Amino acid sequence: MSLAAMVADMLSIPELTHPVTLGGAGTRGIVDEQGSMIPIAGTEGQRIGRTLYVQKDAVPGIAQGATVVVGALGAASAADGRTYLLGPVEPIDDGLLLACQLGGGRP
């Protein structure tokens, strides 16, 4: 089994993933709380934020500034989910996964 097939298989498990929609297209992704250090007034502070991990090319239009709806963990659809604005979207290691910073979070 190829690595791409294993990633797709992992992201198809409803108990581990959230439904995600963007522009009418849907996929499943993993949401995680992630911390990063940012410079603040000559020192560093920790920023905690949500990050969405999705398979590259899972839905068209995944880019910074796009709006996504993320449903509850294990839900069948994102229909009752929260709307987020995507921050930076960066490939992870080999580029099969994208790490998308989530901002906002309105129901």
Image (cartoon, rainbow, N blue to C red):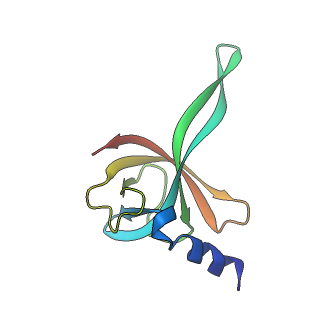
Task: Work out whether 84 lies above or below 37.
Answer: below
Residue nearest the observer in this picture, 85 or 73: 73
Image spot of residue 60 (x, y percent) = 44, 69
Extreme-right residue of the structure: 93
- Residue 44 in which image quadrant: top right
Task: Work out whether 12 lies above or below 46.
Answer: below
Q: In the image, is 29 to the left or to the right of 5? A: left
Q: Residue at x 36, y 71 (%)?
A: 25
Q: Residue at x 31, y 68 (%)?
A: 24
- Residue 35 in which image quadrant: top right
Q: Residue at x 58, y 30 (%)?
A: 47
Task: Work out whether 102 lies above or below 58.
Answer: above
Q: In the image, is 21 to the left or to the right of 79? A: right
Q: In the image, is 104 to the left or to the right of 13? A: left
Image spot of residue 58 (x, y percent) = 49, 71
Image spot of residue 9 (x, y percent) = 57, 77
